[in-house]
Amino acid sequence: MARELPRLNVILVKPSKYDDDGYVIHHVRGVLPSNTLNALNGLFRDAAQKMGITIEMHLIDETVQLVVPERVMRKWAIPGVPTLVGLVGVQTNQFPRAVDLARRFKKLGAMVIIGGFHVSGSLALLGLTPELQQLREEGISLFAGEIEGRTEELLTDALHGKLKSIYWLGELPDLSKEWAAPLVDDTVARRFMLPYAGTMDTSRGCVFKCSFCTIIHVQGNSMRYRSPELIEKHVREHYPRIKHYFFTDDNMSRNPRWREIFERLIQMREQEGIRITFMMQVDVPSYRIPDFVDLAARAGCSQVFIGLESLNPDNLKAASKGQNKLNFFEEMIQAWHRYGIAVHTSYIIGFPFDTVESVRRDITTLMEVVQPDQASFFMLTPLPGSVDHLEMTKRGEWMSPDFNEYDSFHAAQNHPNMTREEWFNVYREAWRRFYSVENLIKVLNRATPESYWGIFKNAVWYAYATHCEEAHPMITSFWRLKGRTERRPTFPIESRLAYAWRRTKDTVVLSWRVVQLILMFEKIWRATWLTKRTAEWRESVAQVKEAQVQRQQRAIARAVAFFTYLHLRMGQSREAWQDAWHLLKRGKLWHPRLYLSSIYGTMLGVSELMTRGWLFLMNLVLET
Ligand code: SF4
């Protein structure tokens, strides 16, 4: 009899966050599936296979599927099989929601572990903070750092029902070895607009030292990278199912093996017809790396995301972002545009030298002079794991006690030159101005025919978030939902009637805004694509007409030249007739020349008449 393999039930949840009314932010449809879930899906299944265990994997992305732990456990818990619930990729602003879910899953008998940037960043710079210590005491495990190389240890512990209270190695895994590539889960993917957009990191870490950044303290201040052979293998294996990738590296331009990766993609594209496209994150000076932009374009790059952060040199200095030189910005955008690659810039509002007026001025410069195709605005946030947060903690400065507000669109700290309300208002103003009809018309009029629809689609998404949902696009998908009973514990559960009234108001307002958005983009489309295409069409019709006229004129000129020549020759007809007449007068009736000259003279005379008629007609045509 076949031996039954040990079984483990794994539920991985990517939590969302609460809105200001305490409702979980989730939508009918998302845009891009979570890279964390796909990556862990691949790693867990691979580890289970190597360990010879049966693993039941269930993935939930809460941004498109509200998590009610009681329902999840009723549906997926298997009697006699241990259940591991992983709250994964948890950022600081998602931490309160993750903790609430963790406690409920724990109560229902699951083993629970929380990982992601909040846990990793806090442990890296601050050690065991009170909120993390509290979780440990409640029996909820913590996972810091990266899981590659430690998946088997975690699954073995879960199988034995003995999770450690903390998984924290400190050292980061070597990425150059064979790795289990991210695996798209169809049940999650179908809830997204771009279900099969692949995500993959070719490297991790960053070589710079921006003070607001957590990457360098979680993923390292030097580059670790995957082997180009493995990246090629992964792309080949998933083509044609996955044709577009988002390379999630924090800074792909500093991956020491970017050239080899691009050359492999170019080879596949140009010689084998494997034509993937991708977007990537790079730094401002990357356009100066020899061949970088050129090879990226040939390899299929369609968009780059670049951290511009500020147009004020004092702010850049204060943020230790010295690599961003103001005189690079315009040149950089032009360099990417020359190759038809769209540029998406991030811009942080709230650095120490910002004021309401200076922010307004800088946003005008951003739109009028720098001219990116897309922009994302953020409020400076002291994220645990960043130097900013560490320094503020040491100085004892005020920071919001509510991690739910560390989402870069709440003022989670005080600002020296603006009240928190002024700061928020000028931040919202930046979004509204960039995604206004006037600016989007300018942006789309600058786009090439190849990049137009990509920029247009992203503009619809970002304008929808800005004008309809009034939220940050990075947490906004399409059509917001609110689960009545899944409210933050600090808020009361509304009665059905109050909730119905709230949702009715929400729906009416959102529907009205969507109608306005459709009209807005109809106007933009007419002023850009339609106007341009009509002008091009008119121009091409005019060119065709012009070519036709030129062809006719050339034919006429040729005919005129021919008949003019003929006409000159026809002058001889008179001489032929005269010769025949002389012969006749002398009575030489049987002289052969008499007949030949008569025939020849007749022919020449007729053609002369025709020529004159033709010339007359031609003159008439040309003059009219
Ligand atoms: S360049 Fe980007 S990833 Fe690198 S340290 Fe600065 S903010 Fe972080």
Image (tube, rainbow, N blue to C red):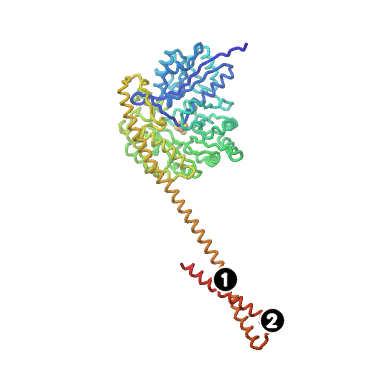
Q: Using the image, tell me which numbered label, if any, was put on residue 334.
A: none
Q: Split into 4 quadrants, where in the image is the N terminus? A: top right
User: For mark 1, what is the residue?
Assistant: 563
Does 349 sit above or below residue 392? below
Residue 226 on image: x %, y %: 56, 29
Does 486 sit above or below residue 556? above
| Pointer 1 or 2: first along the chain | 1
Residue 278 on image: x %, y %: 51, 36
What residue is drawn where x is 34% and y is 39%? 360
Quadrant of residue 523 in the image? top left
User: Camera-side residue: 577 or 221?
Assistant: 577
For this orientation, the residue located farthest to the bottom is 586
Q: Secondary structure at mark 1?
A: helix
Q: Which amino acid is tagged 2?
A: Pro
Residue 212 on image: x %, y %: 42, 30
Left or right: residue 577 compared with residue 446: right
Does the numbered disc 2 mark a residue whose Cβ is under 8 Å from ligand 1? no
Q: Pointer 2: residues within 10 angstroms few (<14), some, or many (20+)?
A: few
Q: Secondary structure at mark 2?
A: helix
Mark 1 vs mark 2, foreground winner is 2
User: For mark 2, what is the residue?
Assistant: 592
